[in-house]
Image (spheres, rainbow, N blue to C red):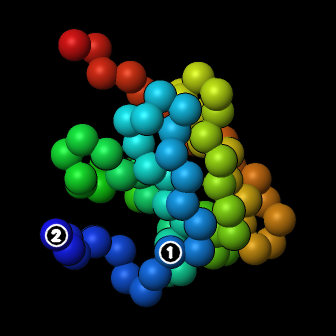
């Protein structure tokens, strides 16, 4: 089954969070995209000052570190569901 993604262009890098709940995608449009594995939907999208070059999820799946083309790092905090 092919499902249309919600980001334009393509994928530069993709990784799965250590807990298996999310894909962390670096889209060719320069965004970091958080994708829910279970619902198959985009949860969040982040753009830096310049196009993002890569990203990685922390071992506890609570943070994403991303790097843009200008060499600036971003630390993105993921909030856990309170339910």
Identify which residue is drawn at 51% across, 45% down.
16
Taking the image as drawn, is residue 48 in sight?
Answer: yes
User: In the displayed structure, would residue 45 be above or below residue 36?
Assistant: below
> Residue, x 29% and y 55% (percent of image)?
42
52 lies left or right of 44: right
Tell me where residue 12 appears, x and y as whole percent: 58, 74
Q: Position of residue 51 (x, y in %)?
A: 63, 75
**Circle 1/circle 2 CB separation < 8 Å:** no
Q: Position of residue 11 (x, y in %)?
A: 50, 75
Binning the other alpha carbons within 10 Å of mark 1 as few (below 14), some (14 to 19) or many (20 upward) gives: some
Relative to 71, say whether 35 is above or below.
above
User: Nearer the N terminus, badge 1 or badge 2?
Assistant: 2
Work out whether residue 30 can be spotted.
Answer: no
Quadrant of the frame with the N terminus: bottom left
Q: Secondary structure at mark 1?
A: strand
Q: Residue furthest front?
A: 1
Alpha-carbon distance for marks 1 and 2?
Answer: 19 Å
Q: Is residue 62 left or right of residue 80?
A: right
User: Which residue is the extreme one toward the top?
Assistant: 83
Q: Tell me the quarter of the image containing the C terminus.
A: top left
Q: Secondary structure at mark 2?
A: loop
Q: Can you tell which quarter of the image residue 64 is in?
A: top right
Mark 1 lies on residue? 11
Residue ID for mark 2: 1
Q: Position of residue 36 (x, y in %)?
A: 31, 45
Q: Nearer the viewer, mark 1 or mark 2?
A: 2
């Amino acid at each position: 089954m092919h499902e249309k993604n919600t980001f334009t262009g393509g994928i530069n890098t993709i990784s799965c969070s250590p807990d298996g709940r999310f894909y962390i995608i670096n889209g060719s449009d320069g965004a970091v995209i958080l994708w829910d594995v279970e619902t198959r939907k985009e949860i969040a999208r982040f753009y830096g000052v310049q196009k993002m070059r890569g990203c990685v999820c922390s071992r506890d799946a609570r943070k994403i570190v991303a790097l843009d083309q200008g060499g600036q790092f971003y630390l993105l905090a993921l909030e856990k569901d309170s339910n």
